[in-house]
Image (cartoon, rainbow, N blue to C red):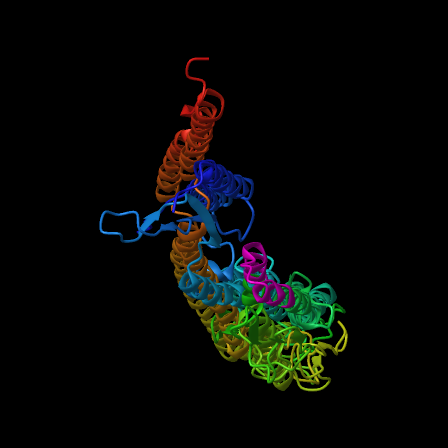
Amino acid sequence: MLNRVTSGTMSTELLRDVNSLTTRIARSQQQISSGKAISAPSDDPLGTQRALGLRSTIADAKQNQSNIDEANGWLQTTDDALGDVGNIINRAHELTVQGANDSLGQSQRDAIALEIDQLAEAVKESANANYQGAYVFAGAATNKPPYSTTPGVDGFQADASGMVARTIGPGVSVQINTNAAALFGSGNTGGAGTGDGKLIATLRDIAAHMRGGTAADGDALRNGDLIALNKNQDDVNQSRATIGAVMSRLDSAKTRLGSIEDTTTSLLSDVEDTDLTKAILDLTNQQNAYQAALKSGASVIQPSLLDFLR
Amino acid sequence: MSVSAFFGLQTALRGLVAHQRALDTTAHNIGNASTPGYSRETANLTAAPALTLPGVTSAGGIASLGSGVDVESFTRTRDAFADLQYRAQNMSLGQYSTTADKLSEAEQSLSEPGDNGIGKVLSDFWNTWSDLANHPSDIATRQAVVNQAQLLTTRINSLHNDLASVQTEAQTEYATIAGSNGDVASAANDIAQLNAAIKSAVQQGDQPNDLLDRRDVALDTLSKLGQVSVTDLGNGSIQVNFGDAAQPLVDDSTVNWPQTLTSPGGQLGALLKLGDPTAAGTISSYLGDLDNMTSQLINTVNTIHGSPAFFTGTNASTIGVGVTATTLNAGTPPALAEDNDIARAMTALRGGAADTAYANLVARIGGDARSANQQQTTSQALVDSANDRRQSASGVSMDEEMTNMVRFQRGYQASARLMSTMDEMLDTLINRTGKVGL
């Protein structure tokens, strides 16, 4: 407590208090207008550090969601192509059963053989399916079409073993590609029965057996070829089931990432954003104090003994 | 022994003169009411030596007849203890306000938290790797990785430069203030000159109040720059020790400056600490942390990327990008179009050593700036309160001066009235005595 208060003391104190009030008003005003409680790291060093981590988590969740969208597009393209192949196999099955019937004439079998060859070409076309410039069945060599578009050239010409993977979470990758070499094979360049038993070889065998017309060919059609075709269909179905499983895994991962993003965004807002109710209340209080200080200052500082002396 | 008839006139004259001096002092106080460092002055009135009258009492003893008033001295009112307190707090204020200013510059260069800081650029950098994993052979995506890497290295380079320039500024400021024409030298020269003037005034028996005030102002200025300790030499002159300088800064009228300081406190102490280029310096240690973060980034990324090196350089000032869109590895070479193992491994670096090191650096600068701000606020409050205490003793109060003015004016009027009464008395004696019957 000061025992002697001069007019100078009063005016410096008033000025100091009014200054500190205007500083606080400016701070509240800035928090309200910018919407940010932290405008520099020194406002809240720990909060800033936390905000950096939270922002990184949000960016990661967003990026992984867009990775999942990419992967889904890829898988959808693969699945559509495999759906087409499934239809082709069904048609081949019908034709084979029809052609295996001994009552058919050779000319009719030749016609069926022609259609089967076309189906083999259609399988190659489906296997050349493309997602955003990438051949989805080509293994890792997605810049090369898996099959030649030249009719009758059946050799798989891309990457037979490569894996294509996408990141869907911190350190989590999933394989999204289906390899045409394993599913459709490379045909039977050495004639009927010399192939790898995959879909294209089976189709070429069927066509050869149709054209052959001998009793042995008929037996081959009825037994070996149909069994092989069924096996090929199982393989395609199994691939589609795998794709379905991966897609549903991606869906659930995306939902989870979405909820991580939401939670983290609201955490970030808690750390970084202005609590408007509190800030406005603070501002109102500070303004009241400011006005009171100015008013009392104006009435205290002005008069002195000088005003009352004659 | 009889008393002269004119003795009363002399007594009244002393009253007039003394009250006039007192009024003059009041005028001096009012005039300097707003002068920084001014201490109010008082005219010390005392009864003049009495006239001794021997043998006037009935017992033949001595009596003293008062002879009026004298102005004995003019003194300034100063609380030396409040001065000491003020200077100690002023030194802390100088130290913390300088630190707070410089650290606020340092934290501005971070632009955190927000979308313009390195944190965001780093996060975007990891994102571009993730995009690359989705399209490993797409040339636009590959270019985006290189561009983002260039942005990142540029931002790290410029943060390094910003912090380094805060350090250089601190060194330059120190050199300016402590230089041979700086603030320390000019305050020291003032004090030395005032010492000489005060000493000669004191030798003549004078009390040079206004010179003392000016010397105190110079000491106040000096106390903000560094630790000041004052020794009174007893002849009005003082010796001033500054910071941890080996020689006294001012000894009587001699100035020893420039001198080497290692830990002077105050503004100079803060600037020395901030600008210290060794690892112990504040900004130096931030630069060290930034280098550490950068080398974490370079090592982790280059290890995964293989040849050619993705980042060139070794620290924050030298880091650059060593690949182009075509030489960038998305997958382990020889890579097929969709090989993306390297890109995927890069995305796993998000939130790793580099991110953590950066977040720690931001938190460290922020924490230091925050504590400097708080200490500045505290020492400002302490300086204010010490100053209030000083003003309480030395400040000019208008009410007080007005009261004194009325008092001294009345005293003057009464003395004048006394003089005219004496005059009338002498008139009676000189002009009317001996005229009986005329």
- What secondary structure is the stretch in magenta mostly built from? helix
Q: Quadrant of residue B297?
A: bottom right
Compared to residue A217, the image places residue A106 above or below, namely: above
Residue most extreme to the front: B437
Viewer-closest of B125 and B293: B293
Compared to residue B377, the image places residue B287 above or below, namely: below
In percent of width and height, residue B424 lies at 45, 24
Residue most extreme to the top: B438
In percent of width and height, residue B429 lies at 44, 26
Viewer-closest of B76 and B73: B73
Q: Residue at x 72, y 66 (%)?
A: B147
Viewer-closest of A249 and A298: A298
Compared to residue B179, the image places residue A54 above or below, namely: above
Could you tell me how many numbered marks the image carries?
0
Viewer-closest of A130 and A167: A167
Residue A102 located left or right of residue A305: right
Specify the segment rendered in magenta: B196-218
In percent of width and height, residue B231 lies at 51, 75
- Residue A74 in sight here: no
In percent of width and height, residue B110 lies at 59, 63
- Residue B279 in sight here: yes
Q: What is the quadrant of the C terminus of chain A in the image?
A: top left
Whether the magenta-drawn stretch holds residue B214 is answered as yes
Q: Quadrant of residue B83?
A: bottom left
Compared to residue A4, the image places residue A107 above or below, namely: below
Residue B169 located left or right of residue A30: right
Whether the magenta-drawn stretch holds residue A310 is answered as no
Q: Residue at x 51, y 63 (%)?
A: A68
